[in-house]
Structures are given as C-alpha cells and as structure tokens.
Image (spheres, rainbow, N blue to C red):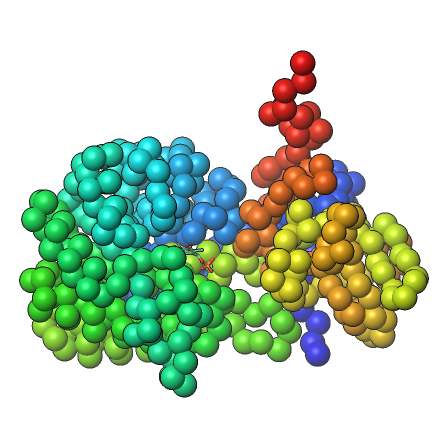
Amino acid sequence: MPERTVPFTKAQMEKIILEFPTPFHIYDEKAIRENAREFLKAFSWNKGFKEHFAIKACPNPQIIKILKEEGFGTDCSSMPELLMSERLGITGEDIMFTSNDTPASEFKKAMELGAIINLDDISHIPFLEKAAGIPELICFRYNPGPLRKTAEGNTVGNPEDAKYGVTKEQLFEGYNIMKKKGSLRFGLHTMIVSNELNADNLVLTAEMLFDLAVEIKQKCGIELEFINLGGGIGIPYRPGQKRVDYKVLSERIRKAYDEKIIGNGLSGIQLRMENGRAITGPYGYLVTKAIHEKHTYKEYIGVDACMANLMRPALYGAFHHITVLGKENSARDHKYDVVGSLCENNDKFAIDRELPKIEIGDILAIHEAGAHGYAMGFNYNGKLRSAELLLKADGAVEKIRRAETVEDYFATMVWS
Ligand SMILES: *Cc1c(COP(=O)(O)O)cnc(C)c1O
C-alpha cells in the first residue's frame, strides 16, 4: 500500500512544534486553494455556479477567508455561522441558510443578511412570516423518501428516516403558498448523501432534481432560479480509495442538465452546491506526539491528542490514515491501538493498525482531519480544545486559533 504523503517533513514539523506544542490541527493552504480552484473550474460551464462552503466542516475564519477569496460562499445552519459569515463580509445570496428546527431569531438574522432561506418544512412558512416576513427568493429542502433509488435499486442512506426536508406533494404546496404570499424567485435543494465516493449516486441526485424542476414548472408554473445539489462529496479516508474526479462528475451532471433542463425548455438554471468535507477534509492533519507505550493484552501507543480533537473514529468507527513522521518508508510491521487519554474506551484513533515501530516522542500525523475534525471537538473530561495552524502557501506557519486554556474552560462556570 503506498504511503500517503504529508506536506511537511519530520524536521520541518519538529521546528513547528518548538513554537506550537502538540496536539494541533494544521491546514495546507496551497492544497486547499488548488482543490477549490479545480472544483469551481469543473463546474464553470454552468453560469453563476456557486459553492457554499459548509461552515460546520471547518469553522475557522482564516479558512473561510481563503475560500471566499477563491469565490466560495457559505452554507450556514446556526446563528454563530451566520455571524461568522457576516464578520467575514459574506452576505446576501452568497449565504445559503439551510437549517432545521430553526429558532425565530435565526430566520430574522438570515433575512437581515439577505441570505437564501432554505425551508425545511412547509409549517415553517407561517413561522418565517411571523418572525421575519416573506423573502423575495425562497428555497425548499426536498426529501425524496422512498422515491430515491440508487442504480442498484437500494435507497441511499435512508431518506425516509431522515428528519430533513419536505415530501414532493408538500414541495408543490410550499411553492404555491410562497407564490401567493409574494415570493418571486425560487430555488430547490436536497442533501441526501454523505461522504459519497460513488459519482453514480451524486449524478442520480442531480437527475432527480432536474426532473423535479420540470415537474415544478408544470405543477406550479414556476421556473426555478437555482438548484442546490447539496454537499456530501466524499473523500478517500482509506488508502486505495479513489477521490471523486470533479471534472468527470461535472461532465455527467452537465449531460443530465442539457438533456433534462435545456431539453425541456427551461433556461439557465443556476447550480449551487454546499460541500464541506471535500473542500478541506484531505488538507488538514491532526499532529500529535506519542507519549506512552503500553503492552498488556494488546500493544498501545498513547498520544497527546484524544477524541476531543478528532471524534470521527470513536463516533463512527471511521478510518483515518496515520503517518509516523520520518518513518514514511519503514515497514508497517507493528500492530497498535493508537489511543487518547479520555476515560472512554472508544478513545482510539486506530485499532489493530499496522504501523512502523513507534518510539516515545515520535510525531504522528492523522490524515483527513480538515473537516469534521476540530469542528466536532468538545470538553468532556476537562479536555481543552487544541490550536489550529495554517501552513501557508509560502511555507510559513501561522497560528489561526490558539489552544483553549483552563481559564477559558472555567470562564463559563459560577465560582462564588
Ligand atoms: C453537513 C451538511 C453539508 C456538508 O456536508 P459535507 O459532507 O461536509 O459535504 C451540507 N449541507 C447540509 C445541509 C449539511 O447538513
């Protein structure tokens, strides 16, 4: 199995660690920019194509700033995410507000910012009207339920179990109500796949929405202004898995667009997407040091990070590749559980993982930690959130979030 590369050498990382102690997340600016450009270029055939970075995947202002410079908007689902967009100068229809179970205050803020409101339910129409009024542009989140089949005839994920979105009948009703209430511009959205590496399923989603656009025109007399295909493009966590080829994916979506949208006399529907994982996931690393080894019924390596820094392995049993710096070419002839220090037995970054022999002090880079990594951090067991660093395009390293201190942790508590 070929070793996955990291954008730093052991010597470089040792120098970085002198200034910024482990553990930390480090993001590769150059790779993020290149990936963002490649993504937008692939879809440039569609006039006005917009990618809204799902903030939840990597909520750091410096990362979002980089993506804004590359032409991305944001996808928000909470007040702080809306406020973060606003503070970075991202407003108006560059924000997609896709929330569910939404508080009135958030609808109000989203409307103030001129964000695109994506309604999760038709019962939210009177709720929105009361909270903030009726927007000119409105979008609905569609949940196809049992209507969604894969190429093999199985439902993807299981939309019927998902709390999100409206049924087809509700969708038509929703557009009709909003039209009566004065909305003039309309969008359609769905998000039914997650970490999807099979382009077939991403194309199927597009085809389903394109067919639906035609039906919406027939049933409601509405020509959609945009279709948001959602996020969910997967990334290869495991060595040997292949990344989604944006160009191939985009060309297949274009073919469906030409046939179903253009072919049915609909003109110029803008496409939007809201990926998070594929945009930053592969370009972030959790860097941690081996501080203990333990030999009992199994071989353990204890590191100075824990599942509070990266929860995916514990939460989903997710695989994250590990590079031991300086041992990239050594035989992976040892089998370890790589563990953190939480009082939870699932605090393991890897189980029975074949790795080179690890010595105390070795630096480990845990891959694909650039999305849903730091973001899912928490304070259980009094664990403090670690720092985030940016490996800049010119090779310099900048701290883009300091580590939490005990004072931060104590600050919200009442002490007297
Ligand atoms: C989580 C989420 C996304 C981003 O998902 P990724 O897997 O990171 O691409 C986009 N839209 C909505 C509504 C989401 O909940």
- The answer to whether 88 is drawn above or below residue 301 in the figure is above
**Residue visible at 35% across and 78% down in the picture:** 149
Residue with the most extreme right position = 295
Residue with the most extreme top position = 416
Q: In screen coordinates, is 134 left or right of 284? A: left
**Residue visible at 23% across and 52% down in the picture:** 122
Q: Residue 146 in the image: x percent, y percent?
A: 33, 73
Q: Residue 176 in the image: x percent, y percent?
A: 11, 55
**Residue 401's quadrant in the figure?**
top right
**Residue 267's quadrant in the figure?**
bottom left
- The answer to whether 201 is drawn above or below residue 342 in the figure is below
Number of labelled discs? 0
Q: Residue 121 in the image: x percent, y percent?
A: 27, 52
Q: Is residue 268 visible?
A: no
Q: Quadrant of the N terminus?
A: bottom right
In front: 345, or 245?
Answer: 345
Q: In screen coordinates, is 31 left or right of 403? A: left
Q: Residue 163 in the image: x percent, y percent?
A: 38, 57
**View quadrant of ligand 1:** bottom left
**Residue visible at 72% across and 40% down in the picture:** 381
Residue with the most extreme bottom position = 152
In front: 348, or 169?
Answer: 169
Q: Quadrant of the C terminus?
A: top right
**Residue 37's quadrant in the figure?**
bottom left
Q: Is residue 2 visible?
A: yes
